[in-house]
Image (spheres, rainbow, N blue to C red):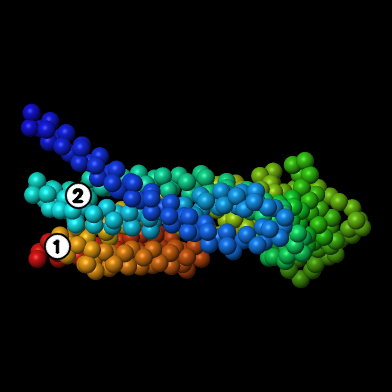
């Protein structure tokens, strides 16, 4: 009978804390995403109106950009939402009542942990399945509606099988390219031929281009210029997976699912990034629930605020500052991992480990007092 009562009370407390935490985190997320959306629209609304896309274009941009903003806002929203939840429980003496009933700080963390992990899984799913699709569609739409896209010079590089493709001009949502150079390599990655194309276009699932110059590398000391029919379009042997949408994703949006990155890493799909970039991004996405757990731990010290101190305590500010420092530090390490300067495992796990150990040390010091 006592076990049933204890189980029932634990379930009620878990549900209460989960509802409080979830409501505050989602409210904070809505506010942060709305602010970020407003800032993004203030930057782009003039260009959207200049393209004569009207209110429909503004709404389309806002909706398609929202999943990316959601993923960016969730870590700080989890931190702020957890801080607000624990601060409310502390100032209203609910934490004191829970402690009197025998609930320890680790027990409180265990009760909050399922909600935080669920939010991390939700954010990971959105980042992996929703954001790549919306960002690809948005990038295609933005490129297709740009009147200056055919004259906007870039330096995009794509690796398809053993070929390296350099693109300078991209338009029509990725279906048209100009000044394209293809470096053909053999299975040993030795350069065999260099083809320069004036334009490349996508028709009925195939790429066609007009070559202006073809150089054949006979030996390291000999390069022959091959004859090219003037103005004649030829079909390119590029992979069928290199569609205009996928081309835009490789060159403009850079947001991809884990499955796509794994396929690119093993060479089954064309790619534009290094293996270190893929590994760092995959690990970072998988570790999102752990990252959110760090945010929970960084907010826990506020439960030690004396109830009489209330909101006059500076401890929530210090916890918020520590969370922002963690986000910046983790972002810096992740950038180093993407560039290959730092091993991917170190780029993802070092920051998490340092801050977890730091929070545990602080909690133990407070408990000793």
Mark 2: which secondary structure? helix
- Name the residue located 12 percent from the left edge and 61 percent from the top edge: 367
* Quarter of the rendering occupied by the C terminus: bottom left
In the image as oriented, which residue stretches furthest toward the right? 230
**Residue position marked by numbered label 2 in the rendering:** 108
- Name the residue located 77 percent from the left edge and 64 percent from the top edge: 151
Q: Are marks 2 and 1 in contact (CB under 8 Å)?
A: no
Q: Nearer the viewer, mark 2 or mark 1?
A: 1
Query: Would residue 321 be found to the left or right of residue 221 on screen?
Result: left
- Name the residue located 77 percent from the left edge and 41 percent from the top edge: 204
Which residue is more in the foreground, 303 or 211? 303
Residue 291 percent coordinates (x, y): 35, 55
Quick one: label 2, few (<14), some, or many (20+) residues within 10 Å? some
- Asked whether residue 43 appears in the rendered view, the answer is yes
In the drawing, what numbered circle is on residue 308? 1
Residue 109 percent coordinates (x, y): 22, 50
Mark 1: which secondary structure? loop
């Amino acid at each position: 009978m006592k076990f049933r009562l204890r189980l029932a009370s634990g379930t009620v407390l878990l549900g209460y804390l989960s509802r409080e935490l979830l409501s505050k985190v989602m409210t904070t997320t809505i506010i942060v995403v709305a602010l970020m959306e407003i800032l993004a629209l203030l930057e782009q609304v003039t260009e959207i109106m200049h393209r004569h896309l009207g209110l429909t274009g503004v709404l389309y941009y806002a909706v398609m950009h929202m999943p990316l903003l959601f993923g960016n806002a969730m870590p700080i929203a989890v931190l702020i939402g957890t801080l607000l939840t624990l601060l409310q429980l502390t100032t209203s003496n609910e934490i004191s009542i829970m402690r009197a009933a025998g609930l320890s700080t680790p027990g409180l963390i265990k009760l909050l942990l399922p909600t935080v992990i669920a939010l991390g899984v939700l954010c990971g799913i959105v980042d992996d399945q929703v954001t790549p699709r919306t960002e690809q569609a948005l990038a295609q739409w933005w490129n297709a509606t740009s009147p200056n896209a055919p004259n906007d010079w870039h330096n995009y590089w794509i690796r398809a099988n053993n070929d390296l493709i350099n693109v300078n001009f991209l338009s029509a949502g990725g279906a048209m390219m100009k000044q394209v150079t293809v470096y053909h390599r053999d299975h040993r990655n030795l350069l065999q031929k260099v083809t320069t194309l004036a334009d490349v276009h996508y028709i009925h699932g195939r790429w066609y281009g007009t070559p202006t110059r073809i150089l054949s590398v006979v030996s390291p000391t000999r390069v022959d210029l091959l004859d090219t029919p003037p103005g004649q379009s030829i079909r390119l042997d590029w992979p069928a997976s290199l569609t205009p949408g996928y081309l835009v994703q490789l060159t403009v949006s850079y947001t991809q699912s884990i499955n796509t990155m794994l396929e690119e890493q093993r060479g089954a799909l064309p790619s534009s990034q290094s293996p270190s970039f893929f590994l760092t991004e995959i690990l970072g996405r998988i570790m999102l629930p752990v990252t959110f757990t760090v945010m929970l731990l960084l907010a826990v010290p506020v439960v030690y605020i004396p109830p009489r101190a209330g909101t006059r305590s500076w401890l929530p500010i210090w916890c918020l500052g520590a969370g922002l420092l963690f986000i910046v530090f983790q972002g810096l390490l992740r950038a180093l991992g993407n560039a290959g300067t730092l091993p991917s495992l170190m780029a993802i796990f070092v920051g998490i480990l340092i801050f977890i150990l730091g929070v545990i040390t602080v909690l133990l010091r407070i408990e000793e007092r």
